Amino acid sequence: QVQLVESGGGLVQAGGSLRLSCAASGRTASTYTMGWFRQAPGKEREFVARISWIGGSTTSTDSVKGRFTISRDNAKNTVYLQMNSLKPEDTAVYYCAYKRTGVGEYEYWGQGTQVTVSS
């Protein structure tokens, strides 16, 4: 089992910044990918960004490029999502997720952290 604990959500004005953290613990694999997803009220969950543990390659959705940065600290098994220039449409519950390298679907999910951006 792998446990994921997110933190760092909150209320911020448009144009502001927040940094989300997600710490993984338990039986983590030697190589894995961690990602961030979000779900706004009445909408489906959508992919935000991901990072591989070896090499640190990243991918993000177009709507956050240039504003959000995903990074990780291997020693702490922690992934971060730095969110700048936040917009009201970024309001959502943000979830981190984990999957072993080579596995198609994410296997473990965090409990989610609320991000609210006021206009």
Image: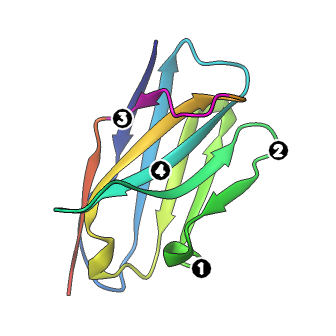
Q: Mark 1 points at which residue?
A: 66
Provide the residue span drawn in magenta. Answer: 103-110
Looking at numbered disc 3 in the image, what kind of residue is underneath it? Gly
> Could you say which is closer to the camera, residue 72 or residue 41?
41
Q: Is mark 4 on a helix, strand or loop?
A: strand
Q: Is residue 59 left or right of residue 55?
A: left
Magenta region, main secondary structure: loop
The picture places residue 53, in percent across and down from the top left corner, at: 71, 37
Q: Position of residue 69 (x, y in %)?
A: 58, 65
Q: Gap in Å between the C-alphas at discs 2 and 1?
A: 21 Å
Q: Where is residue 91 in the image (x, y as percent from the top left)?
A: 26, 69
**Residue at screen point 51% across, 34% down:** 106
Residue 86 pos. (x, y %)? 37, 78
Q: Label 3 belongs to which residue? A: 110
Ranked by sequence position, the earlier of labels 3 and 2 is 2
Earlier in the chain: of badge 2 and badge 1, it is 2
Q: How far apart are marks 1 and 3 (CA)?
A: 25 Å
Mark 3–mark 4 distance (CA, rounded to whole Å): 10 Å
> Residue at position x 44%, y 27% from top?
108
Could you say which disc has been placed on residue 36 in the image? 4
Q: How far apart are marks 3 and 2 (CA)?
A: 23 Å
Mark 4 crowdedness (10 Å alpha carbons): few <14, some 14-19, many ≥20: many
Identified by mark 4, the residue type is Trp
Q: Is residue 21 above or below residue 28?
A: below
Residue drawn 30% across the image and 78% down it: 89
Q: Which residue is the extreme one toward the right?
A: 55
Q: Which amino acid does label 1 sit on?
A: Gly
Which structural element holds mark 1?
A: loop
Mark number, residue 55: 2
